[in-house]
Amino acid sequence: MRRVYFDHSATTPVRPEVAEEMQKFLTDNFGNPTSLHYFGRQTRKALEEAREKVAALIGAKPEEIIFNSGGTESDNMAIHGVAMLNKNRGNHIITSAIEHHAVLNTFKALGKQGFTVTILPVDKYGMVSLDDLANAITDKTTLISIMHASNEVGTIQPIKEMAALAKEKNIFFHTDAIQSMGKIPVNVDDLGVDLLSISGHKIYGPKGVGALYVRKGTRWRQSLFHGGAQERLRRAGTENVPGIIALGRACELAVEELGAEPTRLAGLRDKLIKSVLDNIAYTRLTGHPTKRLPNHASFCFEFIEGESMLLSLDMKGIAASSGSACTSGSLEPSHVLLAMGIPHELAHGSIRITLGRDNSEEDIDYFMEVMPPIVERLRAMSPLDQENEFVMESSCAACKASTSCHR
């Protein structure tokens, strides 16, 4: 059976070059980087070289990079770190309705600890309004956290403008850049952010390793953990050296490929979007039509459950998803789609196609060979599709105003 992997926003395969580099530090260079002897010194040197490679991908200084276990820890470190240390200045923090749960649940936890939390709405494309952000800021606001690009619909936020607004008000700005890293240029000075989250397994590195960028001078509480002096007292615990070395190599390769690869992926993405909208009726593109990640396409199909589509695609060898991998086991529709104003019943019919470096035009062609018959079969079985034409017309009314809806 032909196998096609279209779920790169959930995770990516470890590149052979990355695995090869990582393997050396599982066997030969196994020393603890805090040890003073030869084995420790060799590992410490490699770890600091990896820090330089991660910093180079985002235009940061190596000393501003803190290694950790991945995106969720990075988000928690950033948000807790700034909010708690600056609580004497103010207890108001701002985020958006479409954030990853690593951010939303952290804000929710802080709300139970005396913080006032503002969750900004988004428009039909999943975009946060600069006016809404400006109006939400008070003299008690100390932190704003808005993701750079949506993991679910691919929309890229105007982070540069948001961070500039925060800087004018002396407010710290954090962005979760886990989906944008390695797919589009990400430079911390250009964006103007104070903190930025990174994850290894989204850029062809291993799972269980990531990093947090903290701009020099940011008032940020040190380690979330009590323990040793690792990462300059900023993150206690023996470093995951093989993972860190692999992350550094993955970032190095991402720098080399940031020119051609995003352009190639955008071409595949555009072909996929056009093919789906031209050939499958009652289908809606979700996310911004142009301000989206180059590898990301997401749709809502009327009168079908997303889970049924995913299982049918899997039987044909195609791996896709219905949204965030962290919530794929939930029976509830995506909080991101609901925040965008997509009706509950339509949000249930969502799928996400995220492309990667091994995908080709032939993969798109194969998807379009198998997807229309799947949709036709599932709709024929659906009571929503069988009741009458009036049901179909009224159900589709929610997206008639959108140019992304194909009927």
Image (spheres, rainbow, N blue to C red):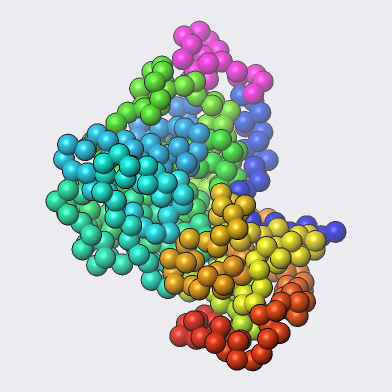
Q: How many marks?
A: 0
Estimate the x, y position of residue 17 in percent, counting from the top left.
64, 39
Q: Quadrant of the N terminus?
A: bottom right
To which quarter of the image does residue 64 belong? top left
The magenta stretch is 26-43
Q: Quadrant of the C terminus?
A: bottom right
Estimate the x, y position of residue 393 in percent, counting from the top left.
57, 89
Estimate the x, y position of residue 162 in percent, counting from the top left.
28, 58
Estimate the x, y position of residue 150 in percent, counting from the top left.
47, 59
Measuring 56% from the left and 15% from the top, which residue is drawn there? 31
- Residue at the limit of the structure toward the right, as seen here: 1
Closer-to-camera residue (12/261) = 12
Measuring 37% from the left and 50% from the top, which residue is drawn there? 175
Let me know if residue 16 appears in the view: yes
To which quarter of the image does residue 165 belong? bottom left
Measuring 50% from the left and 24% from the top, which residue is drawn there? 239
